Image (cartoon, helix red, strand yellow):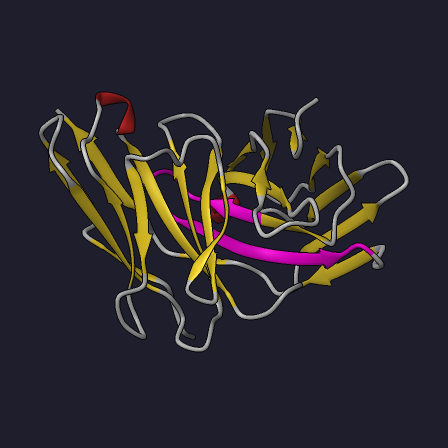
Amino acid sequence: EPEVTQTPSHQVTQMGQEVILRCVPISNHLYFYWYRQILGQKVEFLVSFYNNEISEKSEIFDDQFSVERPDGSNFTLKIRSTKLEDSAMYFCASRGRANQPQHFGDGTRLSIL
Amino acid sequence: SQQGEEDPQALSIQEGENATMNCSYKTSINNLQWYRQNSGRGLVHLILIRSNEREKHSGRLRVTLDTSKKSSSLLITASRAADTASYFCATDGGTYKYIFGTGTRLKVLA
């Protein structure tokens, strides 16, 4: 069964550094998402992406965050200047059509030192 | 309560028993999904139920949806130790994003 894959599985970065999290969505999917989950808390929506542009973003997704689909397969989340509070699991998800389920990757654990 | 709020927060049962988890939400939805998350891992999609559906089955899972009460339930029958995980409901609120609840931590004792 097709899967969403995320790399790396764990990223350790110094505060203030830029970080790029990578995702390969399921190949024929059209909608792409990033979520984050701070340890012990609920999964929070960050941003959705459709037709090569952001469809919706949350208050968390401020100017430090950006997303890109640089080619036909990758979907990336960039954090320009990381803060301690950015430490979390970051999940990528993709969906085929409306009213179809979102499929999640295994996540990238981001640790900011 | 917040969008996609599950109860109970934690549930501990014996293997072979049934587990029921509930989810309440606030806004109208197109669909509601249930996910499972094993500790430190990704979210595994279990069932999607559309707003015009009332009940859906998948193996040992049964999901109900009551849009008049803005609530859903997930029933796991004949539970197994491998069902131990956190279970989340997620609602789309009619938009592109999904709002997750705080989850129910299920522990199935062998």
Q: Residue at x 28, y 29 (%)?
A: A86
* Residue B41 appears in the figure: no
Q: Position of residue B83 (x, y in %)?
A: 52, 46
Q: Residue at x 39, y 48 (%)?
A: B42
- Dominant SS type (magenta): strand
Q: Residue at x 62, y 65 (%)?
A: A100
* Residue A25 appears in the figure: yes
Q: Position of residue B17 (x, y in %)?
A: 67, 41
Q: Position of residue A110 (x, y in %)?
A: 22, 37
Q: Position of residue A7 (x, y in %)?
A: 21, 55
Q: Is residue A95 magenta?
A: no
Q: Is residue B49 magenta?
A: yes
Q: Which residues are magenta?
A: B35-51
> Residue B21's quadrant in the figure?
top right
- Image quadrant in which the N terminus of chain B is located: top right
Q: Residue at x 40, y 36 (%)?
A: A61
Asked if residue A73 is positioned above or below residue B72 in the image, the reply reads below
Q: In this rendering, would B93 be left or right of B70?
A: left
